[in-house]
Amino acid sequence: MATIRDIARRAGVSIGSVSNYLNNPDMLSEETREVIRRVIDELGYHRHAAARSLKSNQTYRIGLVPLISAEENRSLAPSDNAFLEFLAAVNTTAAELGYGVLLYAATSEAEELPIYERLVGERQVDGLILMGTRAVDPRIEFLNERQFPFVSFGRTQNSEDHAYVDVDGAKGIADAVGHLAQLGHRRIAYISPPGGLMCAIHRWEGFRSAMAEHNLPVEGELVVEGGFTEESGQIAMHLLLDLPHPPTAAITANDLCAFGAMRALQMRGLAAGQDFSIVGFDDIRLASHWYPSLTTVSQPFRRIGSIAAQIVIDIITGKEVEHQIILEPKLIVRRSTAPVKESSDV
Amino acid sequence: MATIRDIARRAGVSIGSVSNYLNNPDMLSEETREVIRRVIDELGYHRHAAARSLKSNQTYRIGLVPLISAEENRSLAPSDNAFLEFLAAVNTTAAELGYGVLLYAATSEAEELPIYERLVGERQVDGLILMGTRAVDPRIEFLNERQFPFVSFGRTQNSEDHAYVDVDGAKGIADAVGHLAQLGHRRIAYISPPGGLMCAIHRWEGFRSAMAEHNLPVEGELVVEGGFTEESGQIAMHLLLDLPHPPTAAITANDLCAFGAMRALQMRGLAAGQDFSIVGFDDIRLASHWYPSLTTVSQPFRRIGSIAAQIVIDIITGKEVEHQIILEPKLIVRRSTAPVKESSDV
DNA sequence: CCGCTATATTGAACCGTTTCAGTTCCCAAC
DNA sequence: GTTGGGAACTGAAACGGTTCAATATAGCGG
């Protein structure tokens, strides 16, 4: 395969000029550029990425370490459309800016940190995008300490010292509570995201304060820790329906969880959207196609992914821009929520 | 950051020994190994990936170029769970074998080939995994010509000369036809995958021959080209229901398409699984959670992804193994198919 | 005690870029 | 006609590994 030397020889110029053609074209005269252009075309020359990286310390790659559950059950980086939308946007925006996305799978939480250490240590990527932040996140501590460029989707306890994009989960949940309150629901259950996650903390805060604002009591038995899977929603809903004095509505961890909850209702002969109101989170594509269609808090995953890629590349290239962005989610009202039925509210 | 020379100096050995420690540890005496191990631990040393690649011509990365529609409408590399499952498996298996997965988004078909040329030309990856193969696929022609390691998910017209994993789509569709025929359906519609795709050809062959086998006529008006999206299914189904003599069942391009078709039924007051039978393809997770649950041809995406990664890495490392694998799909019968209703079969 | 083999270790050369100090050339200014 | 300065171009050195021919050392039989 052709090297920069082959091009130089064939074009009758020095390797320095060829390199300049590739990196600082306006240092060359138009004639020289033209000659080099022709030879490069002729030979179908491409720069050797590794050689370039070695010398320039840039890989033009950003890394992403998804947590993939081997057994396809409860995973924090949910194996669902939300992640896919996010990834698609990251990937598209990165590609537009000339960056590839390196994926390195972790199959358990314990594997994560070593993978980050390797990616950073081997200089496989110029920057990283994290997801599923915990309140205290060892990955973020590590990257901060190493001063490695990164951005997280989600905040942490100490978010002032790193770049992030996040959705105002508190507001999203508060809107959901408001919506249900307006429909007359008083016994509103809350199926929370998995404990360690920072988003669980924000959302809980939103739930708590919105309930207070609407003068609704938060009852311990109506608060359950769920997960981002159908199964978790199903289990949680069964639990709630087994209570002596069950709720009339539930706000769930995400849309998949909501689907599971709806399934539990169905199994007991209850109709979601009639006998019981369900609110999801995420607004994945199927939410609107579900039956009944799902009322849910919409997260703009494509925008989030695009912004995350943008930010981490800005950091890499040393551009000074806003690095801490919180987007507004939006409550999408559909058919899975309805006015409370007197009968069921014993 | 520490280099191999730092390690060598500090351990009192030559750089060659350190390199051997990393690549051929049994060339060293136990004592030397021990000393080097300690120093490496102490300094948290990792090999510089680019330097390694430059000399050894190996990147320990495999590439994947998903076709991502910017406007999130009809895409060949469908933005749905099927792809995600596949990707998760590729990524997991690759990681197990020490490979990362480099994603480079294409946002249009025209962009694809140039991206492959760059990835190969710049030696960004050691091998590639393709998806959504066309009957005559320029990407495959290019890679074959360059003798670049790759495997495709899906066959082509000339599949003898490249490695692939595929599902026996013909058999899957034939099974679906058999199932519907057994339920008494005679007017079976077929909503096909997009035209250029090789899988469309195989599946069509399966449909045609299975219909013949069951002595059912294939009527032109009951065959529609669809796509891998809900929208396409909805449109196609409306088309079919507008016919003077509509079908009683339909086999669709994939599960999303089936969901769209079911939605069209619903909009006309027809109940899928009662008034009309629908068969999907893929068996994504939501198929079983849908209402009514979807009868569909199950593709083992996780196995496919895992095998694809395995094969391409085998090719890269020069291992001689079976490189052309066809997996059996499996018809999963659920509630969206039922015996034909006499009334609707005018 | 010598030569021989096997094992362990060494370090220079090389991979293909980027970078930068240095050279050449040309023209404007005095 | 000399000088100074800028634009265009050159090529050696460096990036951090891997590889391999050469060397050192140890062990052993005769």
Image (cartoon, coloured by chain):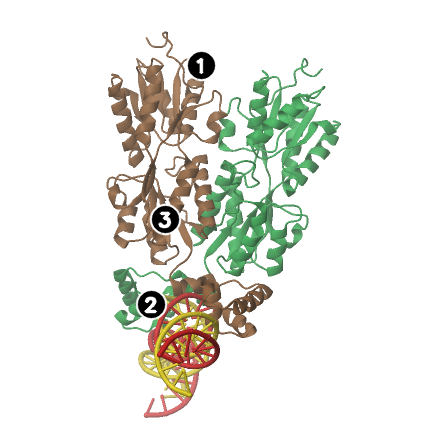
Chain colours: A brown, B green, C red, D yellow
In this rendering, position of residue B44 left or right of residue D10: left
Question: Label 2's element?
Answer: helix
Q: Which chain contains the residue that carries disc 2?
A: B
Question: Label 3's element?
Answer: helix
- Mark nearest the camera among 1 and 3 is 3
- The answer to whether any part of residue B201 appears in the image is yes
Q: Position of residue A284 (x, y in %)?
A: 45, 31
In this rendering, position of residue B25 left or right of residue B338: left
Three-letter amino acid code of the residue under disc 2: Ile
Three-letter amino acid code of the residue under disc 3: Val
Q: Which chain contains the residue that carries disc 1?
A: A
Q: Position of residue B239 (x, y in %)?
A: 66, 25
Q: Quadrant of the N terminus of chain A?
A: bottom right
The label number, if any, that marks residue A269 in the structure image: 1
Of residues A184 and A97, the one drawn nearer to the viewer in this rendering: A97
Q: Residue at x 68, y 51 (%)?
A: B158
Label 2 CA crowd tier, 10 Å (few <14, some 14–19, many 20+): some
Of residues B141 and B279, the one drawn nearer to the viewer in this rendering: B141
Q: Residue at x 64, y 26 (%)?
A: B250
The residue tagged 3 is: A312
Check chain identity for marks 3 and 2: say if they share one: no
Q: Position of residue A61 (x, y in %)?
A: 42, 53
- In this rendering, the answer to whether A187 lies above or below B213 is above
Three-letter amino acid code of the residue under disc 1: Gly
